[in-house]
Amino acid sequence: MARQVITVLTDDLDGGSADRTVEFGIDGVTYTIDLSETNAGVLRTALRPFLSAATPVGPGGRTGRAARRPPARPRSSGREHNQLIRDWAHQHGYAISGRGRMPLSVVEAFHRAHQPGEPLRPRQPRLWW
């Protein structure tokens, strides 16, 4: 069975026939509006002073400044931190493997046991006589 779907655009301002859907954004919100050629021109004319002073972003645009990211943590510090958690877990009776993902309960217990500001370094093994 053949089916033909026809989409008819209606100008959202005056209810007449629309030629296109225009997308624009302001204050972090993106809007779409169906407009005739004439009303799309009116919108573009009204926005022209603002567009000429603005910096385009997103597809086809540029931000004008480098993306801000937190500085990358050296890879070794993540491994060292994980090893500290593993050492702590073994010293406190948790049975975890030497490799792979650690159970979240063990990681949370480690962080609960170490107060903010306390240096994270391996503890000396306890000697039990």
Image (cartoon, grey):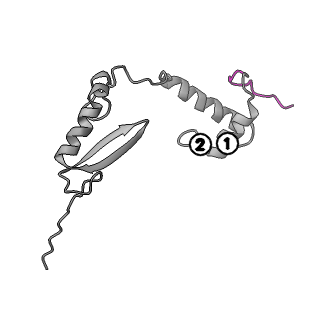
Q: Please give the label number shown on residue 46.
A: none
* Residue at the image point whose x is 71% and y is 40% from the top: 109
**Residue 122 colored magenta?**
yes
Q: Give the range drawn in magenta.
A: 119-129
Q: Main secondary structure of the magenta part?
A: loop
Of residues 24 and 71, which is closer to you in this image?
Answer: 24
Q: Name the residue under label 2.
A: 102
Mark 1 packing: few (<14 Cα in 10 Å), some, or many (20+)? some
The reply to whether residue 116 is in sight is: yes
* Residue at the image point whose x is 18% and y is 68% from the top: 5
Where does the image place residue 65, in percent across and percent down from the top left? 36, 19
Mark 2 residue element:
loop
13 above or below 28?
Answer: below
- Where, quadrant-wise, is the N terminus in this rendering? bottom left
Q: Mark 1 points at which residue?
A: 106
Where does the image place residue 75, in percent across and percent down from the top left? 48, 25
* Residue at the image point whose x is 17% and y is 66% from the top: 6
Which three-letter amino acid code belongs to the residue tagged 2? Met
Separation (CA) of disc 2 from disc 1: 7 Å
Of residues 24 and 97, which is closer to you in this image?
Answer: 24
Of residues 87 and 30, which is closer to you in this image?
Answer: 30
Mark 1 residue element:
helix
* Residue at the image point whose x is 49% and y is 24% from the top: 70
- Where, quadrant-wise, is the C terminus in this rendering? top right
Looking at the image, residue 15 sits to the left or right of residue 75; the answer is left
Residue 31, by quadrant, is top left
Where does the image place residue 87, in percent across and percent down from the top left? 66, 32
Which three-letter amino acid code belongs to the residue tagged 1? Val
Q: Single out the residue that lies furthest toward the right.
A: 129
Contact flag, marks 2 and 1 (Cβ < 8 Å): yes
